[in-house]
Amino acid sequence: MNLPAAILVIRWLIWDTIRQSLASRIFWIMLLVSLIATVFCLSISVSELPTKPTGDAAERLPPTDPQGKKKDEARRAGVDVIDASMTLLFGTIQVPQVRYREDAVRWLQLVLAAGVADTLGILLALIWTAAFLPTFFEPTAVTVLLAKPIPRWSLLAGKYLGVLVFVALQASIFVFATWAALGIRSGIWSAEYLWCIPLMLLHFAIFFSFSAFLAVWTRSTIVCVFGSLLFWMVCWGINFGRHSALAHVERQRRDSPDQAVVYSRTLEGAYWLLPKPADLGYLLAKSLNSEREFPLAEEIKTVEEADGLNPEASLIASLLFALAMLGVAGYEFVKAEY
């Protein structure tokens, strides 16, 4: 079979994967999650928060003085004192804020992007799509296609890309809907939030390559579900552990420059070998200009100052791991007997 015919097969398998998501109702479940997040964004009000001054941002002071003396002094000195609240769920919940309106919206976008979509959403997507490949590789299903002159690599590529197209569609709906809802409610239209779509898709593609590897080797949905989740947690733990260990070493070097400090090269090797979900989350936070709000901000800042972190190199290394997993999976699928 020539390349154009193989491309036609891949296109057909992509569309077949979308139809499979519709038939299994996974499409509508993920759409419901996006709808809930959108309604939540529409329930938010930040009208009480002041807008950030143009030009050089003014200094701001949290309202921590119960007597108001320091606040009055600060106001006379030209310091913004933010003493307002952001309301959630149509005014049901009030959240005190010490941020400007633009910063509060960026913080919400970080929670939605890094917390909801890029962490919980990725894990749920790995669970909900885990059955797509094992059921396809079952002898009763795939032998019909294998009887035709179709390259096996095109079958694996078609199903893998089909799942990516499905996830990209759902990610786009989630991001655009929540972006529009926050923009309508706050008047803040931050285009940086749209970077979440390709970054989340890359994050999912990297870990779904491991799920594809498990699907080819075991053809078990249960193994793909628990194996992918366990692998993600291991990678996150190694990523977090590496940054924490390196930050600790850097602090020791600053405090005691004459003292010898030992750092585990094994941990460093595992960090570069495996995917790096924490780094991907930090890269997402940087795209939103909210890296200071990231949970690992203190450790990562220390590591960055020591030239121990390059988010772009981290992303490339994670993508190389995904390509290696797909290569091994493709080789095993080509050699498998049905």
Image (cartoon, helix red, strand yellow):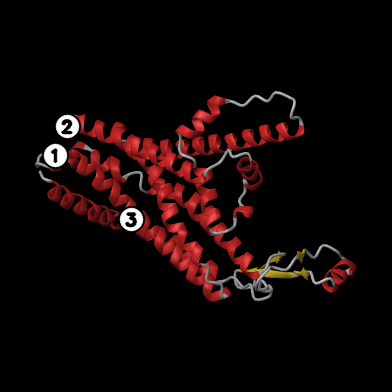
**Kind of residue at badge 1:** Leu
Residue 133 lies, in percent from the top left, at: 29, 43
CB atoms of marks 2 and 1 within 8 Å: yes
Determine whether the residue tagged by mark 3 lies in a helix, strand or loop. Answer: helix
Residue 245 lies, in percent from the top left, at: 63, 33
**For the point 23% across and 34% down, which residue is it?**
333
Image quadrant where residue 141 sits: top left
Residue highlighted by disc 3? 166
C-alpha separation, residue under disc 2 versus residue under disc 1: 9 Å
Compare marks 3 and 2 and give the one earlier in the sequence: 3
Q: Is residue 317 left or right of residue 110?
A: left
Residue highlighted by disc 1? 146
Nearer-the-camera pick, 46 or 280: 280
Compare marks 2 and 1 and give the one earlier in the sequence: 1
**Kind of residue at badge 2:** Tyr
**For the point 63% across and 48% down, which residue is it?**
297
C-alpha separation, residue under disc 3 versus residue under disc 1: 24 Å
Compare marks 3 and 1 and give the one earlier in the sequence: 1
Q: Which of the numbered marks, if any, corresponds to residue 338?
A: 2
Determine whether the residue tagged by mark 1 lies in a helix, strand or loop. Answer: helix
Tell me how many marks there are: 3
Residue 26 lies, in percent from the top left, at: 36, 55
C-alpha separation, residue under disc 3 versus residue under disc 2: 28 Å
Q: Would residue 336 be visible to someone looking at this image?
A: no
CB atoms of marks 3 and 1 within 8 Å: no
Mark 2 burial class by Cα count in 10 Å: few <14, some 14-19, many 20+: few
Q: Would residue 146 be visible to someone looking at this image?
A: yes
Image quadrant where residue 34 sits: bottom left
Nearer-the-camera pick, 45 or 320: 320
Mark 1 burial class by Cα count in 10 Å: few <14, some 14-19, many 20+: some
**For the point 52% across and 39% down, which residue is it?**
236
